[in-house]
Amino acid sequence: MTDIWLNGAFAPCDGAIAANDRGLLLADGVFDTALVLGGRVFRMDDHLDRLAGAAGLLEIPVARNDLQSAMSALAERQVNGSIRLTLTRGPGPRGIALPPDPRPTILGSSAPLTPSAMFSATRLDVSSIRRNETSPTTRMKSLAYLDAVLANHAARQAGADEALFLNTKDRVACSALANVFVLKDGELSTPPLADGVLEGITRRWVLAHAAEFGLAGRERSLGLADLAGATVFLTNSLRLISPATLDPSTIRQPDGPLTPLMIGLCQAIAGECGIDPRELGAAVAPH
């Protein structure tokens, strides 16, 4: 049985989580998924800051150093792949009131690298489920992921790969697993956090470095009409930059303007981790 990281050490999966853990019973927790190459987490500080920040908002008492120790141990063991760190409020009595003396659970797991998923094209289907931009959980990686599970199941039944969420005001929010970008006439746009958007790690990198590739990146609210005739792509920590289409009958290959951005991200990963994803099989289409 594969070991997991549990509260400071590796342990067998079997029987690892208490039956009264609030993460299991109430989805009372958050998680983070990160890319690991060469035993190093890409943008580790960003991942730690986001996870620790979410814990602070939820009043889950956890030391950032404990999160860092878990990430580092998982990365060192996995070498190349992905790691997931799950933080719950821990065991608690029956009911929804916050326990007076919480004992958080830090659960870590890892998975092998899937280079074929990096930069892969994605067919989107607009979900009938709406993203609730009034909820603080839409701006963190909450354990409450059932909307995404159901929306993605419906998208696949419709012949697509992934669901696209609108919020309650008919604005584009995100896909089930990624942030959304629209490139049109040299302007790169992505929905603002206020529209029910997670501050994705790759999203942050793209916004910070877009100008280096001749793109004017900014946050602004988007409607479905803004996606028509535009280059649409998704970003997350494992697929990196994924060209997307709302036509489930086609797979859109990377447009010329996206290719330098993809290569730049590969180079940034190599600079931090010592390995370029392309060396391990990630395919970036030629310009």
Image: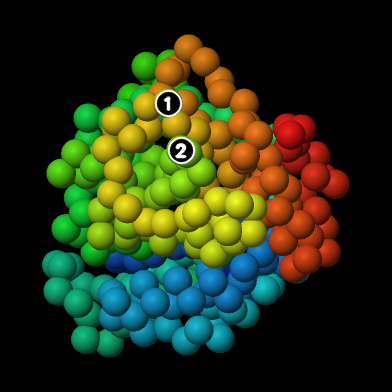
The 10 Å Cα crowd at callout 1, few under 14, some 14 to 19, many 20 or more, is few
Q: CA distance from mark 1 to mark 2?
A: 8 Å
Between residue 121 and residue 74, name the one nearer to us.
Answer: 121
Q: Residue furthest top?
A: 249
Q: Is residue 64 above or below residue 46?
A: below
Q: How is the image coloured?
A: rainbow
- Which amino acid, mark 1? Gly
- Which amino acid, mark 2? Lys
Q: Is residue 82 above or below residue 74?
A: above
Image side of residue 269 versus residue 71, left or right = right
Q: Is residue 89 above or below residue 242?
A: below
Q: Is residue 94 above or below residue 148?
A: below
> What residue is disc 1 on?
229
Q: Are marks 1 and 2 in contact (CB under 8 Å)?
A: yes
Mark 2 secondary-structure assignment: strand
Image side of residue 238 versus residue 246, left or right = right
Q: Which mark is residue 184?
A: 2
Mark 1 secondary-structure assignment: loop
**Can the viewer see residue 272 in this picture?**
yes
Among the 4 quarters of the image, the one containing residue 141: bottom left
Q: Residue at x 54, y 83 (%)?
A: 66
Q: Residue at x 71, y 53 (%)?
A: 264
**Can the viewer see residue 7 in this picture?**
no
Total count of labels: 2
The spot of residue 188 in percent (x, y) is 47, 48
Image side of residue 107 versus residue 19, left or right = right
The spot of residue 8 in percent (x, y) is 58, 79
The spot of residue 61 in percent (x, y) is 36, 84
- Which quarter shows the C terminus? top right
The 10 Å Cα crowd at callout 2, few under 14, some 14 to 19, many 20 or more, is some
Among the 4 quarters of the image, the one containing residue 135: bottom left
Among the 4 quarters of the image, the one containing residue 157: top left
